[in-house]
Image: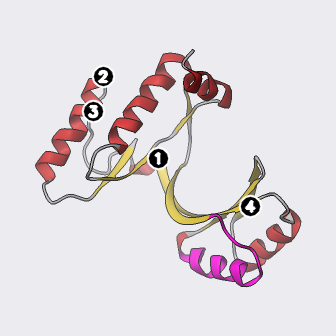
Amino acid sequence: MLVEALTDNRNRTVSEVRHVFSKAGGSLGDPGCVSYLFEKKGLIVFGGEGLDGDALMEAALEAGADDVLEADQTFTVVTAPGDFEPVRESLTSGGFVPVSAEITLQPTSTVRLVGKEAEAMLKVADALEDLDDIQAVHANFDIPDEVMAELASGD
């Protein structure tokens, strides 16, 4: 996990984050020690209902996007950080209205988690996100949809 924080008291924030990790049997690493597992990408998400996916893909690639991914009635346009704004502007001016658009850290590889490991990791992520000084939590775990549904139902 990579945690981004903005704080006026570094010692307090480090202590809070360390506490969350240690409660789950983990540890806090040195700043930047897992950054190689992530790369910065622009993600522009569009709702899929009534959207011409082929036209979006063509427009996105012409505007300089790296890729267009389709899943669950949504399309995600992936860009390099420097191409994010020009691609977003080009698609918006072309009539495509994004649901969300952000530059974020994407994992370069993922680790599949199931069962108690998945449940524990989700609890850690939630606990970190609940801390006041935490801006973002990035993780490289992959939890299958059926496991997520099972955990959400409390079974």
Q: Is residue 119 left or right of residue 91?
A: left
For label 2, the SS is loop
User: What's the distance in space between the residues labelled 3 and 4, CA to CA?
Assistant: 36 Å
Mark 3 or mark 1, which has the lower sequence index?
3
For label 4, the SS is strand
Circle 4 residue: 68
**Residue 86 forms part of the magenta stretch:** yes
129 is higher (above) or lower (below) than 122:
below
For label 3, the SS is helix
User: What's the distance in space between the residues labelled 1 and 4, CA to CA?
Assistant: 22 Å
CB contact under 8 Å: marks 3 and 2: no
Given the image, on which type of amino acid does mark 1 rest?
A: Leu
Residue drawn at (27%, 24%) of the image: 23
Residue drawn at (79%, 76%) of the image: 59
CB contact under 8 Å: marks 4 and 2: no
- Residues 64 and 14: in front is 14
